[in-house]
Amino acid sequence: MSKLIITAALTGAEVTREQQSQLPITPEEIAEAALEAYQAGASIVHVHARTLDGSPTQDKKVYGEIKTRIEEKCPVIFQPSTGGATWHTAEERLQPVELSPEMATLSTGTCNFGRDVFSNPQDFYEQAARLMEQRGVKPEIEVFEAGMIDNALRLVKDGLLQTPLHFNFVLGVPGALSASVRNLSFLVDSIPQGSTWTVSGIGRHETSLAMVALAMGGHVRVGFEDNIYFYRGQLAQSNAQLVARIARIAKELGREVASPAEAREILGLKPRVN
Ligand code: KMH
Ligand code: ZN
């Protein structure tokens, strides 16, 4: 089994300070949370930018500042969101790709998202895939519904995505595919041999699905974007606390945690130069 890549999804677009007082919002807070998550075992940070009043933004300048500050602090892989918030336009959402990050997310289909719709028509995800290819950005394919895998495979056939693919199975978003072991197992069986995958269990499903992924040889994403609690009814103190729990369980299972350099190798990214 390969070493374990832990992704910390530090902020997201939906969680507020009222819900989680430790939510990192400013570029410096996000960079500091990235450093702490790295020290706890994360090799990737999935980032959503916010304005100073806490609203989600896809502004390239804000992402640029976050990227620079993270790079100054630690070697973790910076993975900005192209999902943004459900109300962002396609143009807004693609801005962070122009920074040529090592990775970025790519959602290959539309789904319900709570009471909203997370809209990803074919035109959008083809444009996103093309831009990532031009910029040398490795997509993490966000799968909220099973058909999103089929759409990604069509992009491979059409020459818009290169194999091996890397997937993130996001399970338990209200309105989309539920967080069950059966669903995870079906999704893992549905991706091409040689792909890599990680799981994001939403809310109370975060730790249980992570444990299944650890045993199956998959990778794990945790963090405030997906879950703000440490135990039922007890808020987590930090993103790093959630990362540290996964690193601890992985050790018990004999699964070594990958450094950012090892994660780059597993994902086929170029080594970082500085
Ligand atoms: N905030 C969600 C509507 C991504 O980052 O690529 C979409 C999302 C996916 O979080
Ligand atoms: Zn996200």
Image: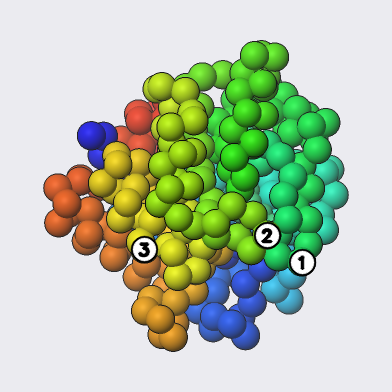
Q: Is residue 98 left or right of residue 141?
A: right
Name the residue nearer the viewer: 229 or 98: 229
Marks 1/2 in contact by CB < 8 Å: the verdict is yes
Instruction: Mark 3 or mark 1: name the one nearer the start of the chain.
Output: 1
Q: Position of residue 146 (x, y in %)?
A: 59, 40
Instruction: Mark 3 or mark 2: name the one nearer the start of the chain.
Output: 2
Q: Is residue 35 left or right of residue 254?
A: right
**Three-letter residue code for mark 2:** Gly
SS type, badge 2: loop
Q: Position of residue 125 (x, y in %)?
A: 74, 33
Q: Is residue 64 left or right of residue 180?
A: right
Image vertical order of residue 10 relative to residue 262, above or below:
below
Q: Residues within 10 Å of mark 3 (few under 14, many from 20)?
A: many
- From the image, tell me which residue sits under label 2: 175
Q: Residues within 10 Å of mark 2 (few under 14, many from 20)?
A: some
- From the image, tell me which residue sits under label 1: 115
- From the image, tell me which residue sits under label 3: 207
Image quadrant assignment for residue 90: top right
Q: Position of residue 257 (x, y in %)?
A: 25, 47
SS type, badge 1: loop
